[in-house]
Image (cartoon, rainbow, N blue to C red):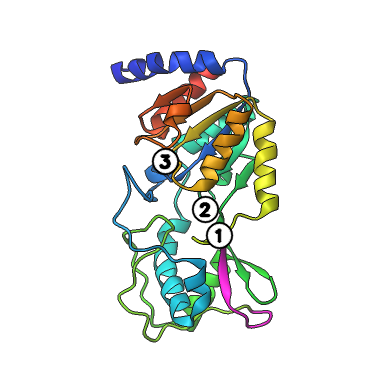
Amino acid sequence: MNTSTLSLHAQLEPVAELLSDRRIAFLTGAGLSTDSGIPAYRGAGSTPRRTPMTVQTFLGSEDAQRRYWLGSHLGWRSFGTAAANAGHRAIAELERAGRAVGTITQNVDGLHLAAGSARVVELHGTMRAVLCLRCGQSFSRDAVAAQIEERNAWLDVPDEVLLGPDGDVRPETTEGFVLPVCTVCAGPLKPDVVFFGEFIPAERFATAEALLRSGDALIVAGSSLVVNSGIRIIERARRRSLPIVIVNLEPTRADAWASATIAASTSLVLPALLELLT
């Protein structure tokens, strides 16, 4: 064990003692996936970002849908093949060891499930599924990607791209791009994610609350807690006076309420915490 690892373990020992007899619920955000090659929205690991697509814009015009689907498709090869990192795997291992009750995530990349976590609430949905806005049929993202390539045989998808936080790439033009459609009713398609301006489905948030109630401590990993969904989870934890531990490279909106804050990479902290707790 090198000096930096020993130093991290020393920093984490009070946290491990705080959590020693508690079952942990996790709340995770984009900072957890930066080491998997998916940039965060803000802070360390983030990329300059244009105004995000809102649900009103997406639903309001086919041009907006072409812009979204072309940019998203150009990034899908990289986004869809991203692999879980050490932070995701540590959370899954804590769950298997009976030390974690599960994970509430703001991420749409599916990497918790890829790492082997069994109990995951994807608050903002998943980019790996697509819904028809007319009939409600669900499709895998890979099936929709295949349809896009069939309808746009001219499209050249680069092997390496500069991804945005949702796996999108800014297209230079949408001219000539043909939208994918539902193969059941020919209706318009939307990824199964909560866009800006949309509400998290009530039943999904209720499932997240139930997961939180089944634990007696909360670790926030890789979220700046700028999005209100994260703050709502924090508020539920505060009402129960749960210990809250925040692991994030940048300050967060909830640092003042935390029992401990750790300004370090989740890929380093979570494996070290796994060692100390198991």
**Region rendered in magenta:** 183-194
Q: Residue at x 62, y 30 (%)?
A: 239
Q: Which residue is mark 1?
A: 193
Q: Percent x, y for residue 225?
A: 46, 41
User: How many numbered dots are placed on residues in this image?
Assistant: 3
Magenta span includes 190 = yes
Q: Residue at x 40, y 55 (%)?
A: 165
Q: Residue furthest bottom?
A: 176
Name which residue type carries label 1: Val
Element at label 3? loop
Quadrant location of the C terminus in the rendered image: top right
Count residues near mark 3 (Cα–Cα under 10 Å), then give few for <14, some for 14-19, many for 20+: many
For marks 3 and 1, give the one nearer the viewer.
3
Q: Is residue 87 visible?
A: yes
* Residue 64 painted magenta: no
Q: Earlier in the sequence, mark 3 or mark 2?
A: 2
- Which disc is residue 246 wearing? none
- Could you tell me if the residues under marks 2 and 1 are in contact, i.e. CB atoms within 8 Å? yes
Disc 1 crowd, CA 10 A, few/some/many (<14, 14-19, 20+): many
Whole-percent x and y of residue 270? Answer: 46, 29
Residue to which mark 3 is pinned: 224
Distance, label 2 to label 1, CA atoms, is: 7 Å
Left or right, residue 175 beside residue 132: left
